Amino acid sequence: MSTKKTLLSIENLDASIGDKNIIKNLNLTIHYGETHAIMGPNGSGKSTLAKALAGHPDCEITKGSIKYKDIDLLTLPVEERSNEGLFLGFQYPIEIPGLSNSVFLKAAINAKNKHQELKDVSATDFIKELKENADMMGINQSFLSRGVNEGYSGGEKKRNEILQMLMLKPTLSVLDETDSGLDIDSMKIVSKGINSMLGANTSSIVITHYERLLKYIKPDVVHVFHNGTIIKSGDHMLARELEEKGYEWLTNE
Amino acid sequence: MANERIIKELVSPNDLDYFSTINQENSWLNGYNKESYLKLLERPIPSNKKEEWRYTKISEAVNQFFLKAKENKTLSYVFDKNESIDDDIHIYFYNGTYYHQGELPSYITTLKISQDHPYFESKIYDDNKIKDCLINDLNTILLSDMLSIETKNNQKIDKMIRIINLSHKDCALSPRISVKLASNSSLKVFEHHQALESSVLNNNIDIHLEENSTLDYFKLIDKQIHSHDLTSQKINIGENSCVNLFSLDSGADTSRSNIDVELNGDNSAIVINALFTPSEALHSGNQLKINHNAKGTKSSLDFRGILDDSSAGVFFGKVKVHKNSSQTIANMSNQNLLLSDYAKISTKPILEIYNDDVECSHSATSGNLDDDKIFYIKSRGIDEKSAKMFLVQSFAAKIIDKIKHANMRETFNNHLLKSLKIN
């Protein structure tokens, strides 16, 4: 492990939402090419970690640091974090009626290109890639001209999150309960999308309640979150153990 | 009301002399101008104690009107040689006169005060019988040319008729338009009030549809600096006929649009989709009165306000379903987006129903841009300003996307983008 290059390094992090201190003294290191699963009971602070990484305005960092690609992530505004290759897959994707999916995605890609001093994506390349990825995600063409997540079912919204991820090609994707509310077929499609992204130069943090998803996406490390910090880490066997025993044997210790 | 002030108090005694001689070359119309003037003088100044004028201060507009009207000008419109000529029909209203290039088709007439005496007089008289209001009086005082568009039975006109109201500095304009559709005909009109500076516009539009006809009417009002823009639009709709009205108003010191619709024929319909986007300290007031007077009539009103800086918007909509109007469908909605802590909106959608067999709804909302939506868009790499712009556009798109005519959709969209400045 030590020869691997570090992508993300969280040190002694405290984060609060409102007056409530939620993340407490968290330490986590993720190398390029790794997939980390974060599991844990409701209210343990998993989603707050996702918000802290993406820069949600409600989430205040009160202590510690986050280094991403050797940049102090906490100094970057939300949009620059994305342009630097950090992607947050929302637990509850937002509906934006009236703003079409394709217009939105094109603007996002061009914002990233601009940040990297690249030219705007050509219309034909964009449409070709969008079509291919939409096909992979089982998203009907007609959805692409509709409003972002407008009137989508829960499963469609999650697949749309993965479609956005595929188009933006992030270095680090943080997927917040992408599997919740998915039926078996959608779970397979979403997993396929996520797996197609993983490689030696990309990493992901998969936040989930269930081992189910981890049958399709093999994590390198599984962490158990409790009371705002990691109380145990292990390999994918830990996930199986949690599925059998629940969280109590760890949280009561 | 013993203490009510009347308009006479706003004007100086010398004004009467001026308005007695305004159309010297045409005595009958001059008499008419003068009569309106005398009538107007005795009118009470609508105070904000009156429901209809509660949020629109009209006295300043009236004041300015008298000041500007007295500025004597002998200007005529010069056509821009580089102007692109498309298939549409272009008519310009400038300094009291309608201008056009080439010959107008037979269904359009510009009535010249000097030429069309008997016909003209009867027209004004007809109009005034059904309209007795302040905006109408102001219009008549300065009335000169009039534009009349009349279809014949079964006449379907594909060309867009573009009416452009132009201004010069410090002017008072009184355009008057009459649109009549005979049975089984159709027509498209685009009316554009181009950016007017330091001017007062009193616009009167009369629309009348016989049976089985369709009118699409597009109205675009540019941002009016130091100006007042008053419009009174009176619409009568016959059996199985429909009027589709789209409008975009970017506001003025006083911008006031009165729309009165009489759904007189069975199964007649009115559809109004409107955006109002005042910014700075500008105002945009919308007053609607819809009367469902016959069976199976439909009204659909969708007004969206986007208000920035310290601007103020008003929506007052009253839909009345009369006793014999069974199977009426009436939907009225006003949604507002406030982009600044200082912007104001006053909204009042009213339904008055005297029949049980109807389907009616009314709603009003107002709010700020949604922080969750802004965060979602920014999380995909898009900066805050663009994120807000996307949200404002998506809010307006619900109106713009209803325009089926592609050129008009583009025109409205471009004007919308121009009128918005997002910080």
Image (tube, rainbow, N blue to C red):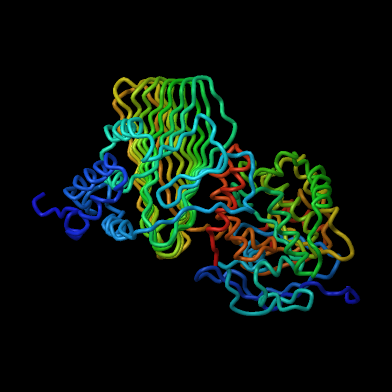
Instruction: Please name whichever residue, B387 or B22, is drawn nearer the observer in this view of the structure.
Output: B22
Residue B227, visible in the rendered structure: no
Instruction: Please name whichever residue, A20 or B70, is drawn nearer the observer in this view of the structure.
Output: B70
In this picture, is A250 found above or below A161? below
Number of on-image labels: 0
Q: Quadrant of the C terminus of chain B?
A: bottom right
In this picture, is B182 found above or below A111? above
Q: Where does the image place residue A203, in percent across and percent down from the top left?
A: 81, 64
Instruction: Please name whichever residue, A235 or B43, is drawn nearer the observer in this view of the structure.
Output: B43
Q: Where does the image place residue B184, in percent across and percent down from the top left?
A: 51, 20
In this picture, is B112 found above or below A53? above
Residue at the image point whose x is 87% and y is 66% from the top? A201
Q: Where does the image place residue A197, in percent across and percent down from the top left?
A: 84, 56
Residue at the image point whose x is 24% and y is 42% from the top? B31
Instruction: Please name whichever residue, B325 or B219, is drawn nearer the observer in this view of the structure.
Output: B219
Residue B36, visible in the rendered structure: yes
Q: Where does the image place residue A234, in percent across and percent down from the top left?
A: 80, 64
Residue B120, quarter of picture? top left
Relative horizontal placement of residue A138, taking residue A248 as reference (left or right): right
Q: Residue furthest front?
A: B25
Relative horizontal placement of residue B64, taking residue A57 as reference (left or right): left
Relative horizontal placement of residue B5, taking residue A105 as reference (left or right): left
In this picture, is B228 found above or below A26? above
Residue at the image point whose x is 72% and y is 40% from the top? A183
